[in-house]
């Protein structure tokens, strides 16, 4: 996946996260989302919104909270396992 596509994915995920936590400021993609008040319920909301946005479902084996600690980790998971298919 090229840099331009990666940036678009980051922007889409940042928009999802920002809307869930009602944040107007920019999120650092490498910062732990817990720093922004993300708890397990909000993480699940983020997961569901990502699945709807990108039209797929995460495999159960990927639903580890460590995969969703930062935007960078979410993007890496998407690029490696879900968006390079086909």
Image (cartoon, rainbow, N blue to C red):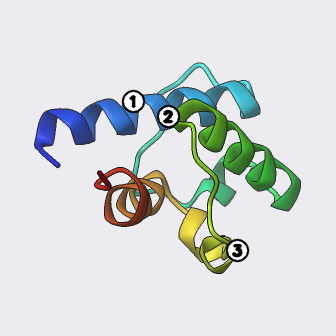
Mark 3 secondary-structure assignment: helix
- 73 in relation to 1, above or below: below
Which residue position holds label 3?
Answer: 60
Q: Tell me the distance, in whole angstroms, between the alpha carbons under discs 1 and 2.
A: 5 Å
Residue 40, quarter of picture? bottom right
Q: Tell me the distance, in whole angstroms, between the alpha carbons under discs 3 and 2.
A: 23 Å
Q: Is residue 48 left or right of residue 73?
A: right
Q: Residues within 10 Å of mark 3 (few under 14, many from 20)?
A: few
Tell me the residue at 74%/32% (across/down).
Answer: 20
Using the image as rendered, state which of residue 30 and residue 9 is in the foreground.
Answer: 9
Q: Which mark is residue 14?
A: 2
Query: Outermost residue, front direction?
Result: 86
Which residue position holds label 1?
Answer: 11
Pointer 1 with pointer 3, Cβ within 8 A: no
Pointer 3 with pointer 2, Cβ within 8 A: no
Q: Is residue 31 left or right of residue 55?
A: left
């Amino acid at each position: 996946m090229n840099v331009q596509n990666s940036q678009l994915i980051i922007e889409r995920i940042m928009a999802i996260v920002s809307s869930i936590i009602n944040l107007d400021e920019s999120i650092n993609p490498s910062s732990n989302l817990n720093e922004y008040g993300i708890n397990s319920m909000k993480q699940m909301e983020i997961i569901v919104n990502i699945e709807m946005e990108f039209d797929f479902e995460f495999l159960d084996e990927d639903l580890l909270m460590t995969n969703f600690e930062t935007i960078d980790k979410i993007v890496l998971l998407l690029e490696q396992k879900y968006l390079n298919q086909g």
